[in-house]
Image (cartoon, rainbow, N blue to C red):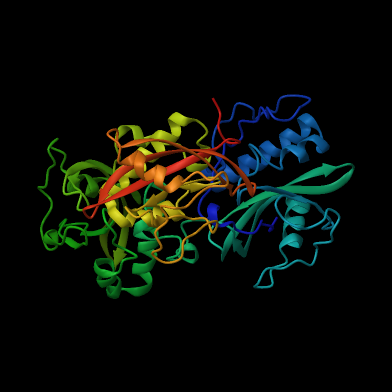
Amino acid sequence: MPFHPRGQGLAAALITLALLSLTLLTAPVAAQTPCDDHAGRLADIHTREQLKAYVHCAAEHIEAVGHEQAFQDFSGGAWHDGPMALFAATIDGEHLFAYGVDIPPGSDLSEWRDSEGTPIVQQQARIARDFGAGFVYYRIENIASGLEEPKESYVLRLDYQGVPAFIGAGLHAQDTRATCSPEVVRASLVYSERDVEAFVTCAAHYLQQNGLQALHDFNSDPRWIAGPTYLILLDMESLVAVVAAGQPHLVGVDGSEFRDMDDVQFAREKQRILATHDDGYVYYRFRNPASGEVEPKATYLRRVLIDGHAYILGAGLYVPAAGCRSLPLAREIVTRDELQLFVRCAARLVEERGELAWDLFLNHPQWIGGATYIFVLDELCRQLVYPLDYERAEGDEPRCDLRDAEGTPLNQNVLDTVRSEAGEGWVEYVWLNPANDKVEAKHAFVVGETLDGEHVSIGAGLYESQLQG
């Protein structure tokens, strides 16, 4: 159903918790659900089949535990995370639930329409009633981006206390032209496989819309080139580079005989894969323009046509150090060990990307979610990265005298810790928890790093209510 909670600044991107590990330990259940052994994450739902499975599992959960318990379970935990949530209504349009919105149960939604006049609830009810299940398409605000975007929901007919009804969920597709806003898809926000796939797909749409002008933009517009992230465009037949924004010396060069140190002919491998597939990945070692070092790289590719001629369009991810590859998302961090790894990986990102890392820290779910976020201070304790309005400094105001609710000089303690012989450590203080608007004890881990010749402090904390173990 087209209802969404209002976007929250700290959960601006893509947010995640455990999906469909439906043991529901925090609530009593009368029976196990058939989907109890289904592992995954809500944020990983991005295909129709995954969305369909999610809704069917919810229907099975209702069958197993009853409406009252299931509707309670659906309000959180394994079932509801940010933009991914379940909804239900009767076939007559009576609202049953849609979590995170201020719509009272029992409201009549039969005339509710999107900005283009699509009667969304009527469509959902008709498809559930006449076809048993199906997909409905409309436009609505994406709470992750704050933008109105296309959305599709899957609805499934069920019985609610003897009344015909339906249950469903929806997702905003990430591979359509209408979801390629620079606010959410840009080079500086590419960190994961899902990011690079959306980035290249949006570049393909941009190329289709703008023709040869797009080639100029790929080489110069910061939306398409930032640090280690840039686009390549190779002639599919000759393997001559038309665009190589991060490696301009390769433009016009025949790459057919290029090999990495492991003897991987990576250009020919790109050609081979796209000869029989529309997209795919090639893995090899290549110089990272952000670090100057030869590093493992995974390049995502799509086959595109320009005036009927085939080209290879792609962008790559330089694979992070082994420990950072399995880094939990910010929202999932609950132990001191996880927090230490989180901050150390953030420091490595600053070492590699410099200030380009700020965009990730402020907007990417890997680095900000729930009550967990990265902060960065300079040598004068000025806030280079700080996402909260709470105690935010104005301009370049030094903040080494900043104290918490108990008088602890927290920024000075951070500075002293990163200047110690160890160069890192723990800082304890009392601070506002943005997840519950309460002041709590906070345990922060901080690491010192050098940026443009100056010392910076990089850290993150866990509040007492978050900490486990």
Q: Is residue 370 shown left or right of residue 379?
A: right
| Residue 38 x/y as whole percent | 58, 30
Residue at left offset 76%, top offset 66%: 112
Q: Is residue 262 shown left or right of residue 391?
A: left
| Residue 443 x/y as whole percent | 49, 36
Q: Is residue 346 above or below residue 398?
A: above
| Residue 314 x/y as whole percent | 29, 55
Q: Is residue 467 shown left or right of residue 191?
A: right
Q: Quadrant of residue 221?
A: bottom left
| Residue 103 x/y as whole percent | 78, 58
Residue 132 seen anywhere in this rendered image of the structure: no
Q: Which image quarter holds the C terminus?
A: top right
Q: Quadrant of residue 298?
A: top left
Residue at left offset 34%, top offset 68%: 207
Q: Quadrant of residue 251?
A: bottom left
Query: In the orientation shown, which residue stands out farthest toward the right?
Result: 162
Towards the viewer: 238 or 378: 378
Q: Which image quarter holds the N terminus?
A: bottom right
Residue at left offset 76%, top offset 27%: 28
Residue 258 seen anywhere in this rendered image of the structure: yes
The tally of labels here is 0
Towards the viewer: 198 or 365: 365
